Image: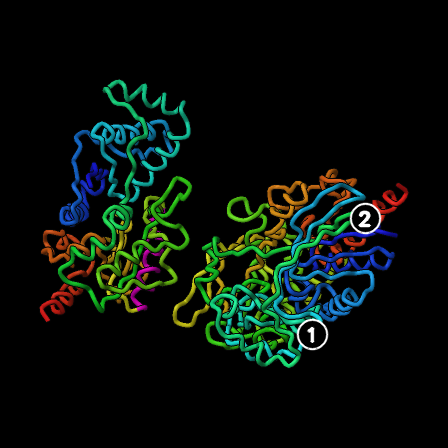
Amino acid sequence: MRYALYLGCWIRTELYNVEMSTREVMARLGVELVDVPGFSCCGYPLRSLNMPTMFYLSARNLALAEREGLDLFALCNGCHASISEVKYALDRDPDLVRQVNENLALEGLEYTGRSRVMHLLEILSGDVGVERIRTSLTRGLEGFRFAPHYGCHALRPSVVGRPEDPEDPKILDGLIRALGAEAAYYPERLDCCGSSLGIYDIESALKMAGAKLSSIKGRGFDGMVVVCPFCYKMYDSRQDVIKRVVEDEGIEIPVFYYTQLLGLTMGLDARRLGLHLNQSPVELAIQRMEEMWRG
Amino acid sequence: MGKAASVVVIGGGIAGIQASLDLADRGVRVHLVEKTPSIGGKMALLDKTFPTMDCAICILAPKMIEVYRHPNIELLTLSEVTHVEGGAGDFRVTVAKKPRYVDESKCIGCGVCASKCPVRVPDEAQMGLSTRRAAHLPFPQAVPLIYSIDERNCLYLTKGICRVCERFCEAGAIDFEQKPEERVIDAASIIVATGLDTYDPSPLKEYGYRRFKNVVTALELERMITATGPTEGQLLRPSDGRHPESVAFIQCVGSRSLSEGYPYCSAVCCMHATKEAILVREHIPEARVTIMYTDMRAFGKGFREFVNRARDEYGVEYIRGKPAEIREEPRDSGLSFWYEDTVTGEMLQRRVDLLVLCTALTPSRDNKRLAEILGVELDEHDFFVQPDHMLSPLGTTREGIFVCGYSQGPKDIPDTIAEASGATAMSAEVIRRAMRG
């Protein structure tokens, strides 16, 4: 299993723990991540301003992966959605491919559509498989109960091919259970984190996130598990602000990226998984885990 | 009148029953072919009919019995048409009859076989809400009132053991030696009355059907509320067996949909939801009952007045708005949803104890196979195609074969009966021409 690792902008500039934990756990699952030089922005920020440029940028990243003969593993939920959307459009419109390829030819690249766009959930549940994850663990999370949060980009737009069912997703639940923990349904599980609203109306965005965190608090979960950098940033790094906005000082929800939780159960050191960079109160949860593991 | 004066009617629901009786009363020999063990169809599953709130089976049962006793009608249950030759005025229709494993001439309908049968399977006539035995009568008013043994579930027919029904049947009616039979019927004309099936809303995962216990379909609610239903007329929440204090109906689930489901309007759901809403209020007067509709299609005779009555006399609340997603509260299995009231433009949230999905109604799922046998065309949803929708609404693409009821297009019971009588007149005309030579 070899993939071209595509990090996008946010993971490379702010969310180092997402990259750290992913590299650590993938190495132990027999997945080789190849760093392809020259990757650019996925084009998503230009989506509503200049579609052709977004097509060009996503196609360029795919063409770079194609040249290496690799599928593209877009670790960021947002990048994965926009590259998938572009691939969906290109694979149905030869004219668009011709236009894109005219520009790509300037640097000797060509888009043919050979490479697949892979999502973290697809790789873990499909190519790697839950069985292999189970055998890679050195300790389990029995007795812990987590709230799964998929994030909208893993689910929609379903027409372009998303890793999960938009109305009743299950993969992340299964991956959490593979670690020995419980993943439970809660009514707000499909609610948006509010991140995409943040630029226009930060207060409403924080209220949306707060409603979900308050519900999770009230339902006795030990933490929240996410698979999207945007959602992660909202629930983890902004949790302090959210508390003040929704006037619920009792919100103390440890937020884990799935790869971090997986790394912990593989026996990896919390620092190697970047858990010291999480801003939500993960220490308390980790402490309880370690006490349990020490027996 | 000879062989020219006979007609094969396919389907023993209200459409086929009415067509058979009309023809038989004119002196035409009718062979009514029904695939299940009893006639009655979907109407037999209903508690009441709209807009008069008549008891459905009370209207239907006398007609069913009349079919059984009519000297001009031959009732062929557990039977299907498998081959058709010839043309208008001179069809040769092959009918395959599955074994009932009960001798029709000996069974007295006492029910001992069913009470002794050890097999329990989901009861189709109760929408799977309760169980029946492998030896069974589909419902108490079944016609013929003869038990049958379901070969997919009977222990003797699947594993070669048991035969306990045979030991207890005093009439000696159990007959495991019965074999499938086939016969060819001469008929001048064929009337197709295969009716409807209900759409299973589980692919519309946003509504949580089969995921959340207290989300049911309208036909399930109909059974839950009827005296012969699994709870003998007590409306109880599936999750905890308590009376719901609030019930909401969602209209157009899988109908009028441009993605999953069907694009057409199923024609009867605004009215059957109104009927069921009244029934809920009659059963549980303190319950809050809401109908979430797309737009109110109360177009028929007495329909608008019926909706007004539900609203003004029974306090049924009508909201124009469609929930996009149903959520379950794990603590009490209650259901909640956000919706836009499209009259006022407000975004609101609602919590209810029981949620009823008014799902699309589709033509019979067996129409595809039947259309091939008959050599007629279906449209993309499996409704029978008319040669001229305006001038020949009961015709099919083959001369001498007519269609009536839901398999022609979405409609209610009175329209179905009107069409059945219409198809009878069309058939009679084929006979008249055939007899003149």
Front: mark 1 or 2: 1
Residue A1 relative to residue B61: left or right: left
Work out whether residue B30 or residue A57 is closer to the camera in this orientation and state it: B30
Span highlighted in magenta in the image: A201-219
- State which chain disc 1 sits on: B
- State which chain disc 2 sits on: B
Where residue B106 is drawn, which disc sits there?
1
Q: Is residue A216 magenta?
A: yes
Three-letter amino acid code of the residue under disc 1: Lys
Work out whether residue B37 or residue A117 is closer to the camera in this orientation and state it: B37
Q: Is residue A25 above or below residue B219?
A: above
Residue A144 relative to residue B340: left or right: left
The image shows residue B258 at horizontal and vertical percentages of: 54, 44
Q: What residue would you read off at disc 2?
A: B427
Number of callouts: 2
Q: Is residue A131 magenta?
A: no
Work out whether residue B403 or residue B347 is closer to the camera in this orientation and state it: B403
Work out whether residue A5 or residue B153 is closer to the camera in this orientation and state it: B153
Three-letter amino acid code of the residue under disc 2: Ser
First in sequence: mark 1 vs mark 2: 1
